[in-house]
Image: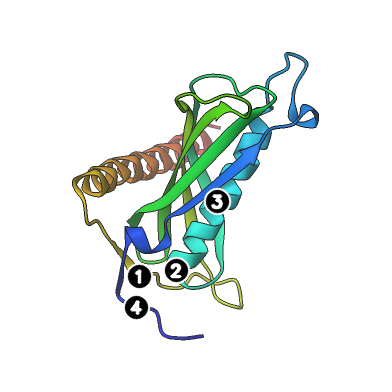
Amino acid sequence: MASTPSSRPTSVTRLSLSHITAQNETNLLGTVHGGVIMTLVDSVAGVVAARHSGGAAVTASMDEMVFLVPVRVGDVIHLSGQVNWTGRSSMEVGVRITADRWDAVGPEVHVASAYLVFVAVDEHGKPREVPQVIAETDEERRRLREAEIRRDHRLARRAAIIESRKAGEAGT
């Protein structure tokens, strides 16, 4: 494997994917299953993470997935993903999902957003270093700042859970 660059702009590994929703992807209400959208989100984010890191990357967590409006059969969903933040071996990838009708011209509607954390791994499944992301625009700098907030919250939540378990073990 080639050596990993020390940094890489967000724009280099950004990815967009469009998907026409079908009847077999719906629930009993006639809207697309959230799990179908989540699978597409994970796929887009995985490609972005692999491209940014220059090799295999695995999903460590889906930090947040917010559904704003339902997706219906016949909607064309558009997923756009990019690396928002990088650590030593991990990356936060943000994915924005919009939709429009397959048979009409109209504005795209923002239907969901998701934030996933990926870890780059080597051929033995061990974490490996990733290039640091370079935020080039004001929007990318905003995304970087917000990703750092989400990371701080993940670390604080994990520390609180560990402390709670220790306290529970001491009390039994």
**Is label 2 in a helix, a strand or a loop?**
helix
Mark 4 to mark 3 CA distance (whole Å):
22 Å
**Label 1 or label 2, whichever comes before in sequence order:** 2
Asked if marks 4 and 1 touch (Cβ < 8 Å), the reply is: yes
Q: How many marks?
A: 4
The crowding category of the residue bearing disc 3, from other C-alpha atoms within 10 Å (few below 14, some 14 to 19, many at least 20), is: many
Of residues 106 and 43, the one drawn nearer to the viewer in this rendering: 106
**Label 4 or label 3, whichever comes before in sequence order:** 4
- Identity of the residue drawn at 78% across and 16% down: 28
Quadrant of res 155 = top left
Where is residue 117 shown, x and y percent of the image? 46, 51
Q: Nearer the viewer, mark 1 or mark 3?
A: 3
Q: Nearer the viewer, mark 4 or mark 3?
A: 3
Where is residue 146 shown, x and y percent of the image? 28, 40
Mark 1 to mark 2 CA distance (whole Å):
6 Å
Q: Which numbered disc covers residue 44?
A: 3
**Label 1 or label 3, whichever comes before in sequence order:** 3
The amino acid type of the residue labelled 1 equals Pro
**Label 4 or label 1, whichever comes before in sequence order:** 4
**Label 2 or label 3, whichever comes before in sequence order:** 3
The crowding category of the residue bearing disc 4, from other C-alpha atoms within 10 Å (few below 14, some 14 to 19, many at least 20), is: few
Is 86 positioned to the left or the right of 22 in the image?
left
In the rendered view, tell whether residue 136 sits above or below residue 19: below
Q: Which numbered disc covers residue 53?
A: 2
Mark 1 to mark 3 CA distance (whole Å):
19 Å
Where is residue 20 shown, x and y percent of the image? 66, 36
Residue receiving disc 4: 5
**Label 2 or label 4, whichever comes before in sequence order:** 4
Residue receiving disc 1: 131
Of residues 142 and 127, the one drawn nearer to the viewer in this rendering: 142
Q: Nearer the viewer, mark 2 or mark 3?
A: 3
The amino acid type of the residue labelled 4 equals Pro
